[in-house]
Image: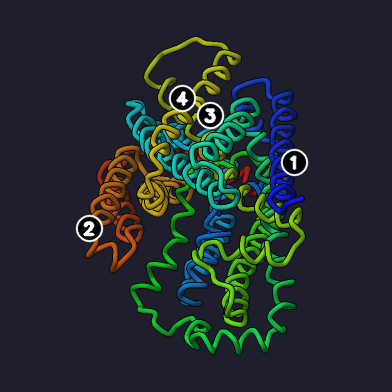
Amino acid sequence: MSSDFYQLIAIVVYMVAMLFIGWYAYRKTTNLNDYMLGGRSLGPAVTALSAGAADMSGWLLMGLPGAIYAVGLTEAWIAIGLTVGAYLNWLLVAPRLRVYTQVSSDSITIPSYLESRLKDKSRLLRIASGIIILVFFTFYVSSGMVAGGKFFMSSFGLNYHSGMLIVSAVVIAYTLFGGFLAVSYTDFVQGLTMFFALLLVPIIGLTLTGGFAETAASIREVDPSRLSLIKGATIAGVISSVAWGLGYFGQPHIIVRFMAIKSVKETKSARRIGIGWMALSLFGAIATALVGIAYYQQNAGSELVDPETVFIALGQVIFHPFIAGIMLAAVLAAIMSTISSQLIVTSSALIEDLYKAIIKSDATDKQYVFLGRMAVLVVSLIAMALAWPNNESILKLVSFAWAGFGGAFGPIILLSLFWRKLTSTGALWGMVAGAITVGIWGSIDALSDTLYEIVPGFVICLVVAYFVSLMTYRPNAEIDKEFYDAMVLLKKER
């Protein structure tokens, strides 16, 4: 039997498993809170790994190893920034957001939380937040579908559109029926798959390249600077890379996991699991690239055409075709976990934050769950239409969207949790100012090539929100009481 056959079997087994998890979650979903937030029932391990898998996408297994392989360790500053940002997100945001969203009207989305927390009667804050999420995530989902199509095209020689449709159909099916629980459970399994794959490939790969000393010597023969974190790096470049960590505070598909965990007490365990998973996975991705440099230097007859396929290529060299298929499934897991997480958040923005805010409806919970599923389908179809032309420029929107969410939502989330004087007007103006700054800065190459647009976006949002809030602040007994109740509950649950 051909190696492609074994690899295809592994992929089919993986996809059937994802559909089974979706069916299991469907049976546990009875109301809108279950569908959008899993009934706030997630344990620490599922919360941590699902947040990590939703965060990393194909960048962890393809983008980062490819960048290290092509340039060297100077590209690892992004990984350092992301690890620090994720740790601070778990430490500062997770426990407070868990209790505050419960105290403030039992909010199940970020826009509904901000509206309730700031007592915004105009609904403008909720609608603006929902629109930002809807627009950015539609393109985000589309980029994942493009990646799925390219995955099947490069791995099995399948037609791009056929590959895209296969990936889209499976993700849509388990997300549409199983909702947040399906997304979280599948992300947990996908996170484990990615984790073990990223550790196995470099560890076993070292046996092919002669161990640590031989591997390092081979890399130095290619270019000694590949092993340096600072050679060739600029101060602005390092700041831009590390600043990726700022994005965590405003990513709806990540921080929504904090709202869904069972209790504040479990955020500590989840933080340890999540950061441990992340640090080891990032280390594995970097090590994979370095082993790849050494392997292809030692095997002059072999050639790696695309640096971003170094993980896949090494997996096929090292393992039996079926195990190599599991490695391919890890790449697919990274792509699918992010698509599904973004779909469920986009669905919640469309129904919970736009439909409910604009259209006064007395629909039942069952009807809202149905509308939520239809929202997943509609957003998916729009994303598929955007992905159909195989337009690579869509993929560039991923870093832009990360900056957009980080610049628009990050400071507002932090201020809402730590500063009781934040006002709805300050939050709205800060959010808009941050998003516009990211949009303008990111569209001017001379600026974005010098400094990543998340830095000015984050700073402008923070400054505008702070000063506008000072000018518009009026004492509000209800806000003060909720802030006090949230802090009391936080202390009690800790």
Instruction: Determine contact: label 3, label 4, CB under 8 Å.
Output: no
List the residue tagged with mark 1: 13
Q: Position of residue 323 (x, y in %)?
A: 75, 56
List the residue tagged with mark 4: 378
Find residue 105 and name its label: 3
Q: Nearer the viewer, mark 3 or mark 4?
A: 4
| Label 1 – label 3 distance at C-alpha | 42 Å
| Label 2 – label 3 distance at C-alpha | 41 Å
Tag 4 or tag 3, which sits nearer the N-term? Answer: 3
Question: Residue at 57% across / 61% down in the picture?
Answer: 87
Question: Residue at 56% across / 13% down in the picture?
Answer: 367
Instruction: Determine contact: label 4, label 1, CB under 8 Å.
Output: no
Tag 3 or tag 2, which sits nearer the N-term? Answer: 3
* The one of 412 and 197 positioned closer to us in this rendering: 197
Tell me which amino acid carries mark 4.
Answer: Val
Q: Position of residue 319 (x, y in %)?
A: 75, 63
Q: Position of residue 266 (x, y in %)?
A: 71, 49
Tag 1 or tag 4, which sits nearer the N-term? Answer: 1
Tell me which amino acid carries mark 3.
Answer: Ser
List the residue tagged with mark 2: 444
* The one of 4 and 197 positioned closer to us in this rendering: 4
User: Could you classify mark 2 by the number of other residues whose Cα lies within 10 Å: few (under 14), some (14-19), or many (20 or more)?
Assistant: few
